Image: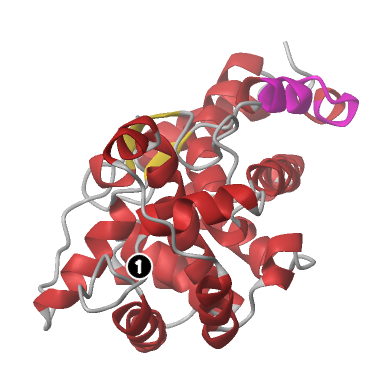
Amino acid sequence: MENPFSVANYSEHTDQELVQASLSGSRQALETLILRHQPFIYNVALKMTTSPADAEDITQEVLLKAITNLSQFQGKSAFRTWLYQIVFNHILNMKKRNKEEMFTSFEGYGQFLDSVPNTELTQDEAMAMKETVEEVKFSCMSGMLLCLDREQRLIYILGEVFRIDHRLASEFLEISPDNFRQKLARARRDLYNFMNNKCGLVNKSNPCRCPKKTKGLVQLGIVDPEHLQFNAHYVQRIRDLVPERAEKMLDSYEEHYQRLFSEHPFQMSERSHRLVESILNSETIKEIFELK
């Protein structure tokens, strides 16, 4: 799987060929073009909303928007720049999703975590609930991202989670590289300050521990051991797909925080193939491309 967020190892020529073939009516080329970018759009949307259902809807919305306007792509920029400008502009301006309304500040999120009772797991329970504890970790960290405002969240996801080169990311967001770096630094500061004061994963003096919160979150119905949302539907982790960081961080502790997020699964939508089929079978798309 080629990573469209990579500077060094991505073939823009392949995109150009697929676009031209799609505009000439090739259903196979259009399907390949969609599948080339769909997983990355979905995973960014998932990190933005922490909801698989919302992420699937957003992915379908932005792909339909981009494909419907594919003939407007003039080749003056790289196709991925054109595509992800559409994607990220949509994400920044879309209606707030349910979970974005739930947690809007680090203070409120911290109070919520404090309200979840701590329960020690027995050794047998810890073994039996290992996957659920991982789900709690991924879910809790994803919730932390919701406490950043939407622009900060997207910039953090692009710059830290997916480690996109700042020049490329700034093109996607249509801001200067310096502005991107400044906004990323503020997002890091806000998120890492909260984690340092609350999260036991990064600061052993903090009492909040994923295993201790697991039973409480299950009892509240926030985590369902029978239907995992984050620790499921993946064969790779984000770290397996993202490039090594080009620039050296000033503070090594920031690398530790970043690694925790890159350990998250790179997930595949359960409905990905149906989503692609629904786009290709859309009467509007068939008419525009005269698909063969």
Vertical arrangement, residue 230 with respect to residue 185, above or below = above
Query: How is the rendered protein coloured?
Result: secondary structure
Q: Amino acid at mark 1?
A: Gly
Q: Position of residue 239 (x, y in %)?
A: 25, 46
Question: Label 1 crowding class (10 Å Cα cut-off): few <14, some 14-19, many 20+?
Answer: many
User: What residue is at 63 percent from the left and 58 percent from the top?
Assistant: 86
SS for tag 1?
helix
Among the 4 quarters of the image, the one containing residue 150: bottom right
What secondary structure characterizes most of the magenta part?
Answer: helix
Which residue is located at x 35 percent, y 67 percent? 159
- Let me know if residue 140 appears in the view: yes
The residue carrying mark 1 is: 159
- How many numbered marks, from 0 up? 1
Location of residue 27 in the rendering, given as x and y in whole percent from the top left corner? 66, 16
Residue 281 lies in the magenta stretch:
yes
Q: Quadrant of residue 237?
A: top left
Horizontal placement of 251 versus 142: left or right?
Answer: left
Q: Which segment did they paint magenta? A: 274-285
Relative to 115, residue 29 above or below: above
Residue 44, visible in the rendered structure: no
Q: Is residue 256 left or right of residue 100?
A: left
Residue 47: x, y in percent?
52, 56
Residue at image location 38% in from the left, 41% down from the top = 265
Q: Is residue 29 magenta?
A: no
Q: Is residue 98 above or below residue 25?
A: below
Q: Residue at x 44, y 38 (%)?
A: 231
